[in-house]
Amino acid sequence: MKQSIFISVNSGIGEILAKHRLDSGYKVIGTYRNTNTFAAQKEERMETYPLDIDSQEDVQDFAKFLGSHNTYWDELIICTGIITPIEEFERCDFGEWSRSFQTNFTSQCMVIRNLLHLRSKSRPMVVVFSAGGGKVTTGFSSYNIAKIALIKAMEYFDHELSDCRFCAVGPGWVDTKIHQNTLDKASESSTIYKETSRRIKENDFGSYEQMTRFFDWLANQKKDVIGGRNISIQYDDWHKAGFQDLLKEQRLGGKLRRSLNSSMNDISQAIGYNE
């Protein structure tokens, strides 16, 4: 029986995917931080564990718990994400900005580092959730910078560990509770507030069925297809013929690189100028 571990299973995406894995015959362990918000959602078939991913002691204790039960994971899926503070960098509370970055990046790397020795020997996979692919949205600097850092981290970790697949997944717009934070914190005149309000009003979100199909597809892909890449559920053609071949041929596809690098290195060649 395959084993999936969901960090922050009580997030909207975590709950959807964990239930799908249970229905598919996986054994699932899910962690949660807030007991009050998780109690009503608890799935009887799933083993749960309280975890504050910002606490090194908590993370180490969780690793010991898994080790003591001889739990070796096939999938480690980290669904943690907080979007606050929603404010321009110059005006924000830097303490809140820093704590958000820690939760959205550093703490997730800490979880991965502490659980790597418990990976299975059968093509294990680590998945984190990215955002924007580099798009700049005013007021979301801590969240987006951390998520972009996760994309690069997946490339590094995938390069260093030949027996494990690492992938950063862009979920797109999914109907989860995180959007309420935008409505609560963002300026009503901002583009992101208006777009979030529109999507909620029109129910313009990607489907849960699309997300579960994507994760079934992802689990079956080889390292040379998904390893170290950032793949979008809603915008990439992962479901179409030829997508795997494209990524196998394009080693840098879905990875962070500096645009116009060769041209900036040799401007004379780029503009066809000769002195």
Image (spheres, grey):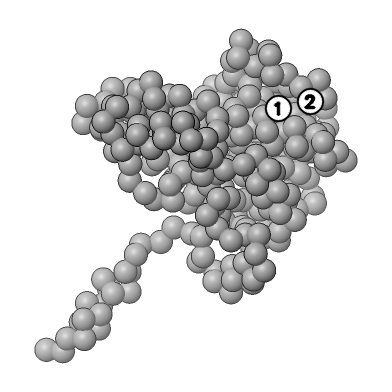
User: Could you say where residue 271 lies in the image, as x and y percent from the top left?
Assistant: 21, 81
Q: Residue at x 61, y 10 (%)?
A: 36
Q: Residues within 10 Å of mark 2 (few under 14, many from 20)?
A: some
Q: Is residue 92 left or right of residue 247?
A: left
The span from disc 2 to disc 1 (Cα, nearest Å) is 7 Å
Q: Amino acid at mark 1?
A: Gly
Q: Is residue 136 above or below residue 196?
A: below
**Residue that mark 2 sits on:** 46
Graded by Cα atoms within 10 Å as few (under 14), some (14 to 19) or many (20 or more), the crowding at tag 1 reads: many
State if disc 1 and disc 2 touch (CB < 8 Å): yes
Image height of 10 relative to 253, above or below: above
Q: On the rendered image, what quadrant is the N terminus found in?
A: top right
Reading the image, the residue beneath label 1 is 30
Determine the residue positioned at 46% across, 43% down.
131
Q: Residue at x 39, y 50 (%)?
A: 134
- In the image, taking residue 159 as reference, residue 30 lies left or right, namely right
Q: Residue furthest bottom?
A: 274
Under circle 1, the secondary element is strand
